[in-house]
Image (spheres, helix red, strand yellow):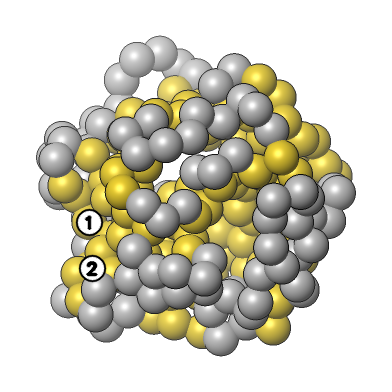
Amino acid sequence: MKALKSILLVVIVLSMAALACDLPELPFGNGTEEPNTNPIPVDGGNDVLFKDDFSKTGSGWDRYDEDGSVTDYADGGYRILVGNENWYNWANPYKSFTDVRVEVDVTKQASPDGDAGIICRYVDTSNFYFLRITTDGYYAISKLVDGTETTLGAGEYTLTDAVNTGVGEVNHVRADCVGSTLTLYVNGEKLEQVTDSTFDSGDVGLLGGSFETGGVDLLFDNFIVYQP
């Protein structure tokens, strides 16, 4: 198993709306392994480019479990446990797409609250888009360019009542990356749409993040990439 790849980021401090606090600089980390050369076949219609219910551990996603962080198959889903504070962990299936609509179910397994999101147009560990909710009811769309995070659109996390909050609650997250338009949905409700042309293709993935307290524990399931 390869060691967790991590990079320190110069992060723009995000001013939160009511009840939220400014976030400090957020390092990123990513566990990696060699991709599986024989992924599970995709079925379900011509518009499905890739899907995974994580029932088979050989479908090619990263597998890492060390130093209090986990990105690995677990309990019939895919678990991201963020052990450190102010940290992001993510995982990829090692694919390449241009325009996509990505959907996934995510369950908050324990306190504390943190980010739960979808990655699109992942170029490398320093360059990609990520569209996410927080498990206490906020959302944001961001990009990482040469290791620096920028929050697009409103430029900050925004509060919504569309997110199901609390331990054991499930949220259905959808991210559309089509042309230069990025759109985030949760539980069928459109949250935000922004325009950015930095990246036009790349891998997809899943992301979890912590704030002032580590231990954010997320379980993802029913990951589907559609042709929009």
Residue 22 visible in this rendered orientation of the protein: yes
- Between the residue at mark 1 and the residue at mark 2, the CA separation in whole angstroms equals 6 Å
Residue 104 visible in this rendered orientation of the protein: no
- Crowd around label 2: few <14 · some 14–19 · many ≥20 (10 Å): many
Does dot 2 land on a helix, a strand or a loop? Answer: strand
Q: Which of 185 and 176 is in front in this view?
A: 185
**Residue 76 percent coordinates (x, y):** 16, 36
Residue 149 image-quadrant placement: bottom right
Is residue 137 left or right of 62 when viewed as pictured? Answer: right
* Relative height, residue 223 to residue 150 (above, below): above
- Give the number of the disc on residue 72: 1
Q: Nearer the viewer, residue 9 or 121?
A: 9
Q: Residue at x 26, y 32 (%)?
A: 53
- Are the two marked residues, 1 and 2, in contact with CB atoms closer than 8 angstroms? yes
The residue identified by callout 2 is: 64
| Earlier-in-chain disc, 1 versus 2 | 2
Is residue 145 left or right of 40 when viewed as pictured? Answer: right
Tell which residue pokes out farthest to the top in this image. Answer: 45
